[in-house]
Image (spheres, helix red, strand yellow):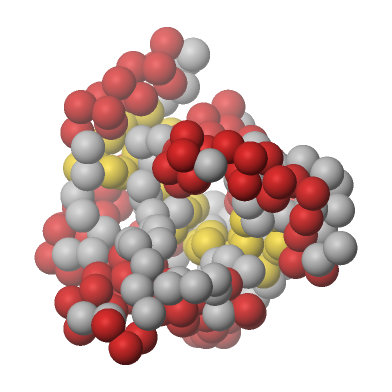
Amino acid sequence: MSKNKVAIITGATGGIGFAVAKRLGQDGYTVVLNGIEDEEGAKRVDELTAEGIDAVYYGFDVTKEEEVTENITKIGEKYGKIDVLVNNAGGLGGRSRFEEMTTEFYRFVMALNLDSVFFASRAAIPYLKKGENPSIINYTSNAAWNAGGPGAGIYGTSKAGVHTITRALAKDLAEYGIRANAVSPGTIDTPFHKQIKSTKPEVFASWAKNIMLGRLGQPEDVASVVSFLASKDAAFITAETIQIGGGQALGI
């Protein structure tokens, strides 16, 4: 069994996921990065290793049940336990109004954001039971409450599912001492927004005006909250969702 605590972070080859992997690595975890870009994954592991962090990469697609189950089982068997599962992978998947929405698009967005949480959590539970202060940390969004902007309705629907499955997992796993919480990042300055940043910089810059604290979030703002939720300091917190948006959810 690994002497270090072990954290799996899905979708960890960039943006918030990588910041989370780095922070948990600095906290002393062995970090298992997941992604679908193997070259990027290898680079990220090299970056972390150069900082003295114990890091490995597993390439698999979180929307594919068999791949998720097989890989998370392999990780659990290798380390003898999992202490933290961070279901970071997810995304908008594109935009579509309901009238034109294809069933394929609907299923893809639901799979990316909600199925992925179910598949990874289910596979990790037997190993979380062997972990120290074990927990699952999911990602929801303001869109779970306000149903998203134009064309993001199914994204909002999938994230509302994440909000509820987090609470359901917390109920289901409490008897084993496994906690389940979620973070809800506001507008974070990551490649997620690179298209609008490059094509409409004035729109991107204006977003900060709708945030009480007057700035966009940084990936590290999310990573520090994930670090807290994974820690013993949060040992009595479960079934919660923490907004990380500088007050954005309240509007101005």
The correct choice, above or below, for 240 with respect to 185 in the image is below
Q: Residue furthest bottom?
A: 99
**Looking at the rendering, which quadrant does residue 205 occupy?**
top right
The correct choice, above or below, for 5 with respect to 45 in the image is below
Q: Quadrant of the C terminus?
A: bottom right
Q: Nearer the viewer, residue 195 or 138?
A: 195
Q: Nearer the viewer, residue 27 or 165?
A: 165
**Looking at the rendering, which quadrant does residue 105 occupy?**
bottom left
**Residue lying at 40% horizontally and 17% vertically, measured from the top left:** 47
Residue 180 appears anywhere in the view: no
**Looking at the rendering, which quadrant does residue 108 occupy?**
bottom left
Residue 94 appears anywhere in the view: yes
**Residue lying at 30% horizontally and 21% vertically, measured from the top left:** 43
**Residue lying at 76% horizontally and 60% vertically, measured from the top left:** 248
**Residue lying at 19% horizontally and 33% vertically, measured from the top left:** 38
Question: Residue 60 appears at what percent x and percent y?
Answer: 19, 50
Question: Residue 49 appears at what percent x and percent y?
Answer: 40, 17
Question: Residue 87 appears at what percent x and percent y?
Answer: 43, 58
Q: Nearer the viewer, residue 94 or 87?
A: 94
Q: Quadrant of the N terminus?
A: top left
Q: Residue furthest top?
A: 50
In the visual, does 84 lie left or right of 82?
Answer: right
The correct choice, above or below, for 193 with respect to 91 in the image is above
